[in-house]
Amino acid sequence: MSGLKVVFWKELADYLGSRKFLILFTIILVSAISIVYILSQNIGEYLSEISKEYVFLNFFTISLGALPSFIFFVSFFGPLIGIIFGFDAINSERSKGTMSTVLSQPIYRDALINGKFLAGLATISIMLISIILIILGLELGVLGIVPNLEEISRIIVFFIASVIYIGFWMSMGILFSIIFRQTTTSALVSLMMWIFFAFFILMISNVIADQVTPLNQNSTLEMIAKNENIKSMIMHISPVVLFQEITIALLNPSARVFGISALIKANDLLPTPLPLSQSLMVIWPQFVGLLALMLICFAVSYIVFMRQEIRAT
């Protein structure tokens, strides 16, 4: 346990003091402040678009022309942050020749990799909670309205989901840093996986669904639904899709279903907000799936690292 604490605090200090952390933190922070400022200056134009019951949540979801919403920045930059924290976690130690030196101390292998992973999650949590508190503080100062308990609870769950989402990409970066000796290789492979899950998974799901259930002008509603279900099954292996659905249900309390079901039932369902407990039931499969992906990816990293031979250089 003492070895784990040593690694954790050392890695946490390295993460918080690194330039890459400061640069990424500044980018997201400036973007979030810009969104809040522009919204506050033009709040009258957006009163018709936002829910009066959940004013604070709307500041996270509304996009302003060319300036996307805050959840877009988390969805887009989150994987990059996780990859940057993880892609050189192990192979950089090997290239510097410090791995064998560290393990020659009373520090076990599991303490090393667990400490790096936990320090990364702690850094991600500090970064996200700081930005969210700054946004809430700016909103409170501009609007003069105190968020209700429902909004605070939803923001807390959104924060937890965001940490898990970025944690998956960090654990994937750690895995590739264990498998590949070169940091450039692990970084490129991690970025390729992000591009695949973020962009190519949609094209692949469309191709497979159209091959299994081709659609034409005479297609019935049942065939269209089957085609969409196949697409949905394939796309839900992507953490990007899982996180997007989680954020939609949390920050838009009226959301009940996704995909083709949302289109079919849109006219039948009243746009009344759901309580948090009901929203959690809607996104429970996505939340569990995202958590499982992170834990599985880290478990594979742990097993591979524990079985690798480490030689003194």
Image (cartoon, rainbow, N blue to C red):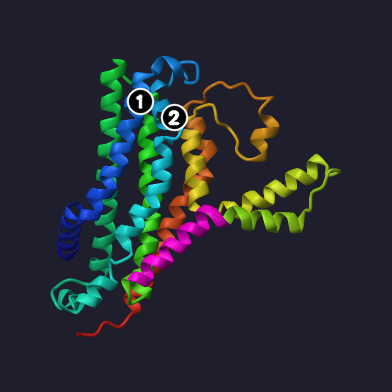
Residue 185's tag is: none
**Mark 2 touching mark 1, by CB under 8 A?**
yes
Give me the residue at 42% from left, 35% from top.
67
Q: Is residue 91 left or right of residue 297?
A: left
Indicate the quadrant containing the N terminus: top left, top right, bottom left or bottom right.
bottom left
- Residue 171 spot, x, y in % from top left: 37, 60
Question: What type is the residue that disc 2 sits on?
Answer: Leu
Q: Is residue 195 left or right of residue 270?
A: left
- Residue 32 spot, x, y in % from top left: 33, 35
Q: Residues within 10 Å of mark 2 (few under 14, many from 20)?
A: few
Q: Which residue is mark 1?
A: 38
Residue 64's tag is: 2
- Residue 24 spot, x, y in % from top left: 29, 48
Magenta stretch: includes residue 193: yes
Q: Residues within 10 Å of mark 1 (few under 14, many from 20)?
A: few
Residue farthest along the right direction in this orientation: 218
Q: Which structural element holds mark 2?
A: loop
Q: Main secondary structure of the magenta part?
A: helix
- The answer to whether residue 161 shows anywhere in this view is no
Name the one closer to the observer, 281 or 45.
45
Indicate the quadrant containing the C terminus: top left, top right, bottom left or bottom right.
bottom left
Residue 87: quadrant of the picture: bottom left
Name the one closer to the observer, 119 or 307.
119
- What span is in magenta? 184-200
Q: Which structural element holds mark 1?
A: helix
